[in-house]
Image (cartoon, helix red, strand yellow):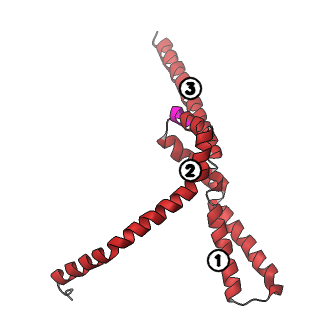
């Protein structure tokens, strides 16, 4: 009789683990679909552009003749290859899937997908970079007004603390 219980328990565990694996797979699939919809694979495009600009700037600073343009392009291509190894989508995707599946349940992932696939969600995706940049400008401008006062407070604190001990 005890063998029967062990077999039943083992079968139950096997079914439960199979369901857990299926749940994890569908959860990961939902996260992958979400990352696709929000175009997460394009997150590093600005990084690539910055690196390309760095090489072009260095090329210009060196006052290299136009005949050396193929040299610049060769190094830019090599830089892209180095970036692909470090931050290519195939490198980032597994960690991003883990991040999103660890943060959002499968049900929440499906709700996010539904939203971002809607016209409003698409508008949010299109508008967010500009809104983020403009928000940063507004914050920076407001912060600049506080800089003189903060600097004065730092000076006052330093005076009260006295000279550093040697």
Query: Secondary structure of the magenta portion, mostly?
Result: helix
Q: Residues within 10 Å of mark 3 (few under 14, many from 20)?
A: few
Cα gap from disc 2 to disc 3, whole angstroms = 23 Å
Side of 86 where 161 appears, left or right:
left
Residue depicted at x 42% and y 69% = 141
Q: Nearer the viewer, residue 77 or 39?
A: 39
N-terminal of the two: label 2 or label 3? 3
Q: Which residue is mark 2?
A: 95
Label 1 vs label 3, nearer the camera = 1
Q: Residue 108 at x, y = what percent? A: 51, 35
Number of marks drawn: 3
Side of 13 where 40 appears, left or right:
right
Q: Which residue is mark 3?
A: 19
Q: Residues within 10 Å of mark 1 (few under 14, many from 20)?
A: few
Q: Name the disc covering residue 54, or none.
A: 1
The part of the chain drawn in magenta is 105-109
Q: Residue 160 at x, y = what percent? A: 16, 81
Q: Is residue 108 a member of the stretch shown in magenta?
A: yes
Q: Residue 57 at x, y = what percent? A: 67, 81
């Amino acid at each position: 009789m005890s063998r029967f219980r062990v077999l039943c328990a083992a079968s139950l565990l096997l079914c439960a683990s199979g369901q857990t694996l299926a749940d994890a797979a569908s959860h990961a699939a939902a996260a992958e679909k979400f990352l696709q919809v929000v175009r997460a694979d394009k997150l590093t495009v600005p990084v690539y552009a910055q690196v390309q600009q760095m090489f072009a700037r260095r090329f210009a600073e060196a006052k290299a003749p136009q005949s050396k343009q193929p040299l610049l392009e060769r190094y830019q291509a090599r830089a892209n290859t180095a970036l692909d190894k470090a931050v290519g989508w195939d490198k980032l995707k597994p960690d991003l899937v883990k991040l999103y599946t660890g943060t959002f349940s499968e049900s929440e992932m499906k709700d996010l997908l539904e939203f971002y696939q809607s016209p409003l969600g698409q508008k949010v995706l299109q508008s967010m970079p500009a809104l983020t940049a403009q928000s940063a400008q507004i914050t920076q401008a407001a912060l600049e007004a506080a800089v003189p006062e903060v600097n004065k407070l730092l000076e006052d604190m330093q005076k009260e603390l006295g000279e550093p001990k040697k």
